[in-house]
Image (cartoon, grey):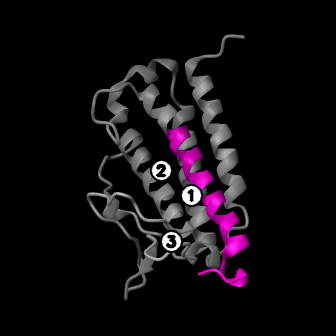
C-alpha cells in the first residue's frame, strides 16, 4: 500500500484527535478553573461576563503554569485561527477568541472547531499540500501547507497531553486532596 501524503496526514490528525477526545471527555468546570501553581495563567470573566485568557507579549521566560481552562481556550484559539487563515477570511485575531465560560460549552466549541477543520481538510487533494498560501498562520515563511498540516497534529497532541496531565494532577492534588 502506498497511501497519499494527504491520507497519512489525515490519519495522523485522526490519531491526535482521538487523544484529545479522551482527555476532554467528562471535563468539569472545577477542573478548568483549578490553578496548579500560584500565578498560573487562566481564563477570567470580565464584568460583562466575557471570558478572556491571560496573555502577555512577549511571553515570559519561563512561561507560567496554566489551568485547564487556559489550555482549552488555547486549543480553541489556535484551531479557530488556523481554520480562519487556511479556509476563511483571515480576519481573526487573538483578541477575537474568548473562552465559552464552562467546561461543557468549551468542549462543544472545540469539537465544533474540529468538525469544521476536518470537513475543510477532507475537500483537499494532494496537490494542495504544496501550496503555501493556506499556511500563513502561524507560518509566514512560505512553507507548503503540508508542513502546516503536520504541525496541526503535533500541536493538537501537545495540547491534549497537557490537558490530560493537568487532569491527572487535579485528581491527585486538587482541592479535594488538599491542593490549591
Percent coordinates x, y for residue 37 in the rendering: 51, 73
Residue at 63% from the left image edge and 79% from the top image edge: 30
Q: Rounded to the nearest whole Å, what is the CA distance between mark 2 and mark 3?
A: 14 Å
Q: Quadrant of residue 104?
A: bottom right
Report the magenta residues as a range: 152-180
Label 1 sits on residue: 110
User: As rendered, which of 159 and 142 lies closer to the eye?
Assistant: 159
| x 34%, y 57%: residue | 61
Q: Is residue 15 left or right of residue 124?
A: right
Q: Which of the two discs, 1 and 3, labels the residue nearer the N terminus? A: 3
Location of the C terminus (image quadrant): bottom right
CA gap, disc 2 and disc 1: 8 Å
Q: Is residue 27 magenta?
A: no
Q: Position of residue 38 (x, y in %)?
A: 47, 77
Q: Main secondary structure of the magenta part?
A: helix
Q: Residues within 10 Å of mark 1 (few under 14, many from 20)?
A: many
Q: Which mark is residue 100?
A: 3
Q: CA distance from mark 1 to mark 3?
A: 10 Å
Give the residue at mark 2.
Answer: 79
Callout 3 secondary element: loop
Amino acid at each position: 500500500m502506498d497511501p497519499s501524503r494527504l491520507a497519512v496526514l489525515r490519519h495522523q490528525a485522526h490519531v491526535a484527535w482521538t487523544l484529545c477526545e479522551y482527555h476532554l471527555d467528562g471535563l468539569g468546570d472545577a477542573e478548568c478553573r483549578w490553578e496548579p501553581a500560584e500565578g498560573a495563567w487562566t481564563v477570567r470573566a470580565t464584568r460583562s461576563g466575557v471570558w478572556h485568557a491571560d496573555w502577555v507579549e512577549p511571553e515570559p521566560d519561563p512561561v507560567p503554569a496554566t489551568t485547564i481552562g487556559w489550555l482549552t481556550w488555547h486549543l480553541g484559539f489556535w484551531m479557530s485561527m488556523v481554520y480562519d487563515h487556511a479556509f476563511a477570511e483571515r480576519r481573526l485575531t487573538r483578541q477575537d477568541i474568548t473562552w465559552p465560560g464552562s467546561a461543557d460549552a468549551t468542549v462543544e466549541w472545540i469539537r465544533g472547531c474540529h468538525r469544521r477543520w476536518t470537513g475543510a481538510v477532507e475537500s483537499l487533494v494532494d496537490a494542495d499540500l504544496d501550496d503555501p498560501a493556506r499556511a500563513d498562520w502561524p507560518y509566514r515563511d512560505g512553507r507548503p501547507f503540508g508542513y502546516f498540516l503536520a504541525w496541526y497534529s503535533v500541536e493538537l497532541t501537545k495540547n491534549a497531553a497537557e490537558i490530560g496531565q493537568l487532569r491527572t494532577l487535579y485528581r491527585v492534588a486538587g482541592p479535594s486532596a488538599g491542593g490549591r
